[in-house]
Amino acid sequence: RKQSDGWYSRSRFRKALESREDLARQAGDSTRRNVGSGKPTRCEVPVVFSTEMAQSFLGSLASAMMGDNVFRKHSFLKDSLGETVANPEIRLSDEPLLPGKLGSRHYDNEGVKATPLMLIDQGKLLSFMCSTYSANKLDRQSTGHAGGISNLMLKPGNYCDEELIASIDNGLYLTGMSGQGVNLTTGDYSRGAQGLWIRKGKLAEPVSEFTIASTYPEMLKGISMIGSEVDDRSTILTPAFRIDSMNISGS
């Protein structure tokens, strides 16, 4: 069965881009590891989200924190301000003033001054991201987020990727997702997926053509280990992390 994958480099500065040779090698390695993939059996196991998949996960979470979705009641977090919504280890912020990062800015699209904003601290939801319009609807002040996030940053933990994988006896290392199975209103999460199976703390065979499913509340509280290596090729600055339990629907 044919397989495809890729790799990319992204930076504000040309000198920080990876070489073409490194990009080709990474793309080839990523593609080769998918060769011979099969479907996993139906089960409930721990899942390690690679940095790329962590970016996707947090991107959807950020949408649920945007004032436009909150005042329209299109967010599962609409009534959760001040409540514990995640593992106490979670510290998530939007950081517009980081030097040289892709989302850094001094003002939002309305000209409101951009300032750092703590969103989740010790698992507790502290703020929504508001434009002037959504802030008025919520009887709040603009947070300088007309146009969306700047640099969304999950505070790194103390584990390298190898340690995240080694912590799992039987589970999934998630490297790809497809489909639009994120319901921001209910928090339901169901995506087509591919990755590598983990057996006795080691990466084993590639797997594809299956679905991972859970809910955002369960997943946020199930993040038990956070990696230390941040991928800065995006406006979402996050390491990999482990979620203790997700449903796998395969063969």
Image: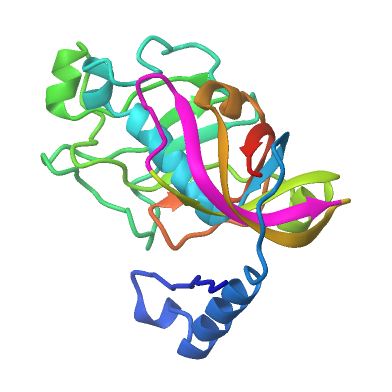
Q: Residue drawn at (46%, 40%), measured in percent from left and top? A: 58
Q: Residue 33: percent from the left, percent from the top?
A: 66, 71
Indicate yes or no whether the magenta region holds residue 182: yes
Please tell me which residue lies in front, 9 or 177. Answer: 177
* Number of numbered labels in the structure image: 0
**Image quadrant where residue 30 sits:** bottom right
Q: Position of residue 80 (x, y in %)?
A: 43, 12
Q: Position of residue 91 (x, y in %)?
A: 55, 33
161 in magenta? no
Q: How is the image coloured?
A: rainbow
Q: Is residue 31 left or right of residue 152?
A: right
Secondary structure mostly seen in magenta is strand
> Which residue is located at x 40 percent, y 46 percent?
179
- Image height of 93 relative to 208, above or below: above
The extreme right residue here reads: 200
Left or right of 155 on screen, residue 6: left
Is residue 219 shown left or right of residue 96?
right
Quadrant, the N terminus = bottom right
Q: Is residue 168 shown to the viewer in this render? A: no
Up/down of 11 relative to 159, above or below: below
Find the magenta span and give its range. Answer: 180-199
- Identify the image quadrant of the C terminus: top right
Q: Quadrant of residue 16?
A: bottom left
Task: Answer yes or no: is residue 242 visible.
Answer: yes
Please, is residue 233 above or below residue 40 in the view? below
Q: Position of residue 99 (x, y in %)?
A: 39, 59
